[in-house]
Image: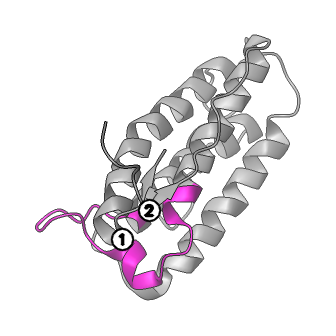
Amino acid sequence: MGAPIQNQTPRAPEPADGTERKLLLRWLGFYRDALDTSCAGLTDDELTLPAAWPSPLSLHSLVRRLTDLERTFLVRALGGETEPEADTAPAFELLHPGEAQTALATWRAERARADALLTSGRLTDKSPGNGRSLRWNLMKVITEYARQAGHAELLRARIDGRISG
């Protein structure tokens, strides 16, 4: 058995069991927290550092991508918005470091808007914005967060050696 890993960031515990709705919302919270933890304490330059040239993938771009998902599949879908907003810049483009903190603030604001819309309705209710069930929209967002959480952990480890554990 090797030495304990240094530079380990505590990970939020996996959600406890519960009703389907509670479980879905807890997993959404778990993955949101994982991304937040991966970004915590980093400078704008570190958040925007690309994974490996020529890929523009960075924590900053992951935050932008997940902001778009929150906005599209939770805020717009559940709120009944069908028209896209004017700012539709691709999330995975090379980004300017000076925009990283704004991107984090926007992500947190979209999360809060989504959370306000997730307080009511049945999982089988059709969303007015896209006609899909609340369950479908939640699963879409949760699976995308799960896909990106591993990328975020690797990006964080590359930046300062911190790993989740």
Query: Which span is picked out in magenta?
Result: 36-59
The answer to whether residue 117 is above or below residue 136 is below
Q: What residue lies at 61% left-to-right and 61% top-to-bottom?
A: 107
The answer to whether residue 63 is above or below residue 130 is below
Q: Determine whether the residue tagged by mark 2 lies in a helix, strand or loop.
A: loop
The answer to whether residue 71 is above or below residue 23 is below
Q: What residue lies at 78% left-to-right and 14% top-to-bottom?
A: 18
Q: Position of residue 91 (x, y in %)?
A: 38, 60
Q: Position of residue 103 (x, y in %)?
A: 54, 71
Question: Is mark 1 in CB contact (under 8 Å) with mark 2?
Answer: yes
Q: Residue 159 lies in what quarter of the image?
A: bottom left
Amino acid type at mark 2: Asn
Q: Of label 1 and label 2, which has the lower sequence position?
A: 2
Whole-number angstrom distance, CA of label 1 to CA of label 2: 8 Å
The outermost residue toward the right is: 120
Asked if residue 149 shows in the view, the reply is yes
Mark seen at residue 97: none
Mark seen at residue 7: 2
Q: What residue lies at 47% left-to-right and 61% top-to-bottom?
A: 64
For the residue pair 42 and 13, the one nearer the viewer reads as 13
Estimate how packed mark 2 is, as few (under 14), some (14 to 19) or many (20 or more) residues with alpha carbons within 10 Å: few
* Residue at numbered disc 1: 160
Q: Residue 24 lies in what quarter of the image?
A: top right
Instruction: Give the quadrant of the N terminus.
Output: top left
Amino acid type at mark 1: Asp
Q: Is 55 situated left or right of 131 in this image?
A: left
Q: What residue lies at 32% left-to-right and 53% top-to-bottom?
A: 154
Asked if residue 70 shows in the view, the reply is no
